[in-house]
Image (cartoon, helix red, strand yellow):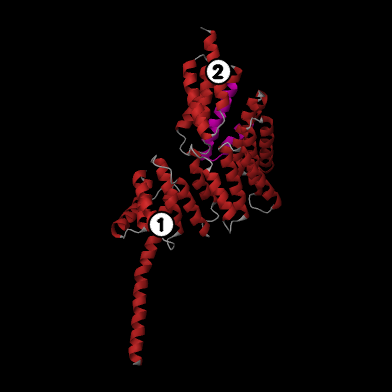
């Protein structure tokens, strides 16, 4: 009897060992395939061999959430967004709690992005985003990934019907999620403020900016403390500019820039450059052309220090600011040169650091056409700018309508 029990125990142990030997390669294979998928969703290239491994797996494995997710990722990488939508939708229907956090979160992130690129239905954007954030909140690995939070929320910036939805989702996240680090909370306050500012809800934007600044003042040991202080002052400047309080905007931009000037932190160069562009635009609104020139000189010193992905964005904005200055001064030939140079850079701008540069550039072109008396071209462009500005919350409508009214008056006077 004892021998039979021993044989039985040995048999069970051997069976477990065989199962483990079989499962370990499968687990290792799954980890490798997911590492390829992670590289793809982060914008990295993977080798043809690695695509072949995914293809082999898809041909031989059962159709579970991982299978459909990987099929969606490969379609997403090939920009076949219609197929990606189909596969991610299928993966979402099969997700189980024990699935990898990466699959659970990115199924919904990439589903939304695929829907956006495919120009399909967007009714499910909010629910998909909410599910992605729900799975993030449950994950120790992803909970404090604020860059991913921004990726999820910023998709609503192009939603003309409700571009505040992203801000509201992040509000729910920062209020309800336990285990957020202090730095994560500060960054989320900043993101919420920025989203509300872009949407034109300056009251809500200011509320979160001041909340972030108060949090920083009470927590001086937060990593990257100065960087966040600088960003909050810059967003306050953006809000003041949107409210046409140009002098107040300049003061906030100066507070942001002073932090950079004292530290000269390489991580702040891009933010400082953008603050300078916005400060220069505020000076332009006040007619202080010498101050604009001073801003452009400081900007010229910073641009060589910028990372390549951000350099062309700032160069475009610098060229646009110069063109606006030249138009104000009546130097239309030099304005044309700046606009054409900026347009060439825009055509090759693959990585977008600053949004809506094309709309700002079009506004300068419309002004340039107007000053030359090319009224038909100017009016056509102004009408386009009004629509785009209203959709994106850029605040260009007032100036555009004013310029259009001036054109109509000039045309009536010449009849």
Which of the image's four quarters has the N terminus?
Answer: bottom left
Q: In the image, which is nearer the foreground, mark 1 or mark 2?
A: 2
Left or right of 253 in this view: 90: left
How many marks on residues?
2
Q: Residue at x 35, y 51 (%)?
A: 87
Question: Would you name the residue on which mark 2 appears?
Answer: 405
Q: Residues within 10 Å of mark 1 (few under 14, many from 20)?
A: some
* Among the two numbered marks 1 and 2 on one chain, the one whose residue lies closer to the N terminus: 1
Mark 2 and mark 1 in contact (Cβ < 8 Å)? Answer: no
Q: Where does the image place residue 326, in percent across and percent down from the top left?
A: 58, 21
Residue 259, image quadrant: top right
Residue 207: give its label: none
Q: Secondary structure at mark 1?
A: helix
Q: CA distance from mark 1 to mark 2?
A: 58 Å
Left or right of 15 in this view: 150: right
Verify whether residue 260 appears in magenta. no
Q: Which residues are magenta?
A: 298-326
Q: Residues within 10 Å of mark 2 (few under 14, many from 20)?
A: few
Q: Is residue 1 above or below residue 330?
A: below
Which of 25 and 172 lies nearest the eye of the viewer?
172
Verify whether residue 300 appears in magenta. yes
Question: Would you name the residue on which mark 1 appears?
Answer: 34
């Amino acid at each position: 009897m004892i021998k039979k029990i021993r044989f039985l125990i040995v048999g069970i142990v051997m069976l477990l060992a065989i199962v483990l030997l079989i499962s370990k390669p499968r687990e290792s294979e799954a980890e490798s395939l997911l590492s390829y998928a992670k590289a793809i969703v982060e914008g990295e290239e993977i080798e043809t061999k690695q695509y072949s491994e995914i293809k082999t797996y898809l041909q031989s494995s059962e159709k579970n959430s991982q299978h459909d997710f990987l099929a969606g990722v490969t379609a997403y990488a090939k920009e076949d967004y219609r197929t990606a939508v189909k596969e991610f939708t299928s993966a979402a229907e099969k997700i189980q709690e024990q699935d990898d956090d990466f699959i659970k979160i990115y199924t919904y992130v990439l589903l939304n992005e695929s829907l956006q690129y495919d120009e399909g239905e967007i009714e499910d954007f909010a629910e998909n985003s909410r599910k992605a954030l729900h799975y993030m909140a449950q994950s120790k690995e992803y909970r404090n990934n604020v860059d991913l939070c921004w990726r999820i929320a910023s998709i609503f910036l192009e939603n003309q019907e409700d571009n505040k939805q992203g801000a509201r989702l992040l509000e729910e996240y920062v209020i309800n999620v336990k285990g957020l680090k202090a730095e994560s909370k500060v960054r989320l306050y900043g993101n919420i403020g920025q989203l509300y500012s872009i949407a034109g809800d300056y009251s809500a934007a200011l509320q979160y900016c001041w909340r972030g600044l108060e949090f920083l003042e009470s927590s001086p040991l937060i990593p990257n403390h100065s960087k966040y202080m600088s960003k909050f002052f810059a967003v306050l400047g953006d809000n003041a500019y949107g409210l046409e309080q140009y002098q107040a905007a300049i003061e906030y931009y100066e507070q942001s820039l002073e932090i950079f000037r004292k530290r000269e932190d390489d991580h702040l160069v891009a933010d400082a450059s953008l603050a300078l562009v916005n400060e220069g635009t505020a000076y332009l609104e006040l007619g202080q052309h010498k101050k604009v020139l001073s801003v452009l000189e400081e900007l010229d010193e910073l641009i060589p220090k910028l990372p390549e992905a951000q350099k062309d964005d700032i160069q475009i904005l610098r060229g646009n600011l110069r063109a606006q200055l030249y138009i104000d001064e009546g130097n239309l030939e030099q304005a044309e040169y700046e606009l054409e140079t900026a347009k060439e850079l825009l055509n090759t701008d693959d990585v977008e650091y600053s949004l809506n540069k094309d709309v700002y550039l079009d506004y300068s072109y419309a002004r340039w056409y107007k000053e030359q008396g090319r009224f038909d071209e100017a009016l056509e462009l102004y009408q386009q700018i009004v629509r785009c500005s209203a959709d994106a919350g850029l605040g260009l409508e007032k100036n555009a309508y004013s310029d259009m009214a001036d054109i109509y008056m000039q045309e009536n006077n010449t009849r």
